[in-house]
């Protein structure tokens, strides 16, 4: 089946009555950067998202609040710290993989998370930084101790419920040294595994897991495989320490449940359904939707992401498929097949920023997809976030115009 052009998909979505766009953030509506504190969001994008109220939500592994949260980017884009809450201009949806819920006025909650888990998460960033300071000198002996301390500090993202070690800046010190880049990836994985063990010692066995970005799917034990560095593609750059249940595909069902409840007055998965009570596997999530959601109440779903990977397995027997957006995009596509709708998947090229990522420019999708890939990519945005933001704004305007045309004129029967 041929892919759609941006104009074709825009025309299709402009007139859909019940629409829900589920969109990732970093690499989609803003460029990937080495230091997340330097991210910028386009004012036009924020205003377009508000026009799509009721038809648009976010689903991100980033977070909404605090100094690293997307809410700060919204305020910067609008040059106003109070207007977003007052007028409902924050981005509604799920962050931290699904455990951080926000409405458009910035009201944030963490359904299913307990105090002991929150306390461990609060202490995790300092522990991550200390472990980095201990271990980085072995891989980067030529870098002075003062510089290493600075890089260790920058690498730790002190988010509230998904603290992360992001080595983008450290990789920048050895841009063409693939062996040492792989050493750094091994160091990062071992460091985060130690933190998991410390959580077990604190009585929190089963509370957390590690999310690698990007990754090559899960191994037989359910752990995410790191994507090894290669020339031109640095592979896994960061690992998030996440609450169990923080899966984007589970978050998709939470958002879908809330959307149906708002439209029909009844939540098919229950009023208290959240990612921590959801099934932990893809098939379980699909079966839950099939058995509990009336297909006639399904909206047309559009999934937007940037991180999808596919690499030939070392033994040549198949493909290792992963990427933090693959799971929810695949589930979204399968829900469409079940409910008889052409749910759509948009993939945005995130190689234009500061992080080495595979490009969509040549259309070959090497490292992204493969000939047997079950995930169908309906629309590619090879020009990256700027092109997507422009298209998104035009879609918002088109839907507003369509809604205005559908209103009865004064005096009409």
Image: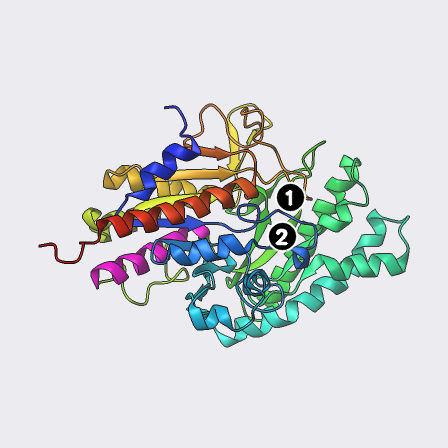
Residue 182 vertical position relative to residue 312 in the rendered view, above or below: below
Dot 1 falls on a residue whose secondary structure is: loop
Q: In this orientation, which residue lies closer to the viewer: 248 or 53? A: 53
Which stretch did the figure color magenta? Answer: 248-265
**Label 1 Cα crowd, 10 Å radius (few <14 / some 14-19 / many 20+):** many
Instruction: Say if residue 381 shows up in the picture.
Output: yes
Give the x, y percent position of residue 107.
Answer: 44, 72
Q: In this orientation, which residue lies closer to the viewer: 54 or 363? A: 54
The reply to whether the magenta stretch includes residue 253 is yes
Magenta residues, dominant SS class: helix
Q: Residue at x 79, y 35 (%)?
A: 176
Residue 153 vertical position relative to residue 225 in the rendered view, above or below: below
Give the x, y percent position of residue 163.
Answer: 61, 62
For label 1, the residue is 236
Q: Which image quarter: residue 38?
A: bottom right
Q: Residue at x 19, y 47 (%)?
A: 296
56 left or right of 266 in image: right
Dot 2 falls on a residue whose secondary structure is: strand
Q: Disc 2 to disc 1, how far (Cα)?
A: 8 Å
203 left or right of 353 in image: left
Q: Which image quarter: residue 283?
A: top left
How is the model colour-coded? rainbow
Residue 315 vertical position relative to residue 68 in the rendered view, above or below: above
Q: Residue furthest front?
A: 411
For label 2, the residue is 239
Q: Are marks 2 and 1 in contact (CB under 8 Å)?
A: yes
Q: Residue at x 40, y 34 (%)?
A: 7
396 left or right of 80 in image: left
335 left or right of 249 in image: left
Instruction: Say if residue 107 shows up in the picture.
Output: no
Which corner quadrant holds the C terminus? bottom left
Q: In this orientation, which residue lies closer to the viewer: 131 or 75? A: 75
């Amino acid at each position: 089946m041929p892919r759609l052009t941006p104009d074709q998909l825009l025309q299709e979505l402009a007139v859909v009555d019940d629409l829900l766009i589920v969109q990732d953030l970093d690499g989609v509506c803003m460029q990937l950067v080495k230091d997340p504190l330097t991210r910028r969001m386009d004012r036009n994008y924020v205003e377009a998202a508000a026009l799509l109220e009721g038809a648009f939500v976010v689903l991100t592994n980033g977070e909404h609040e605090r100094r690293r949260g997307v809410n700060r980017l919204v305020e910067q884009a609008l040059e106003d710290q109070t207007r977003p809450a007052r007028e409902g201009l924050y981005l509604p949806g799920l962050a931290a993989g699904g455990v951080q819920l926000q409405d458009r006025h910035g009201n944030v909650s963490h359904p299913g998370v307990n105090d002991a888990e929150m306390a461990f998460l609060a202490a995790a960033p300092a522990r991550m930084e200390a472990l980095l300071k201990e271990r980085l000198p072995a891989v980067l002996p030529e870098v002075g101790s003062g510089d290493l301390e600075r890089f260790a500090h920058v690498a730790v993202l002190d988010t509230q419920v998904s603290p992360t070690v992001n080595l983008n800046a450290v990789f920048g010190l050895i841009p063409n040294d693939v062996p040492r880049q792989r050493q750094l990836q091994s160091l990062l994985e071992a460091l985060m595994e130690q933190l998991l063990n410390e959580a077990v010692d604190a009585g929190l066995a089963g509370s957390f897991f590690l999310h690698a970005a990007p990754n090559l799917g899960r191994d037989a034990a359910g752990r995410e495989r790191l994507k090894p560095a290669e020339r031109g593609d640095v592979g896994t750059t960061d690992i998030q320490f996440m609450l169990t249940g923080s899966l984007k595909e589970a978050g998709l069902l939470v958002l879908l449940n809330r959307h149906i409840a708002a439209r029909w007055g009844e939540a098919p998965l229950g009023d208290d359904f959240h990612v921590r009570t959801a099934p932990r596997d893809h098939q379980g999530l699909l079966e839950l939707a099939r058995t509990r959601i009336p297909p006639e109440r399904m909206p047309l779903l559009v999934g937007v992401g940037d991180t999808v990977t596919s690499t030939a397995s070392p033994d040549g027997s198949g493909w290792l498929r992963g990427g933090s957006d693959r799971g929810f995009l695949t589930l979204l596509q399968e829900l469409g097949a079940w409910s008889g709708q052409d749910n759509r998947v948009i993939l945005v090229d995130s190689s234009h920023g500061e992080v080495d990522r595979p490009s969509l420019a040549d259309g070959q999708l090497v490292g992204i997809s493969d000939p047997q890939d079950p995930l169908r990519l309906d629309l590619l945005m090879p020009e990256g976030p700027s092109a997507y933001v422009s298209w998104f704004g035009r879609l918002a305007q088109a839907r507003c115009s369509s809604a205005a045309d559908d209103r009865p004129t004064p005096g009409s029967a």
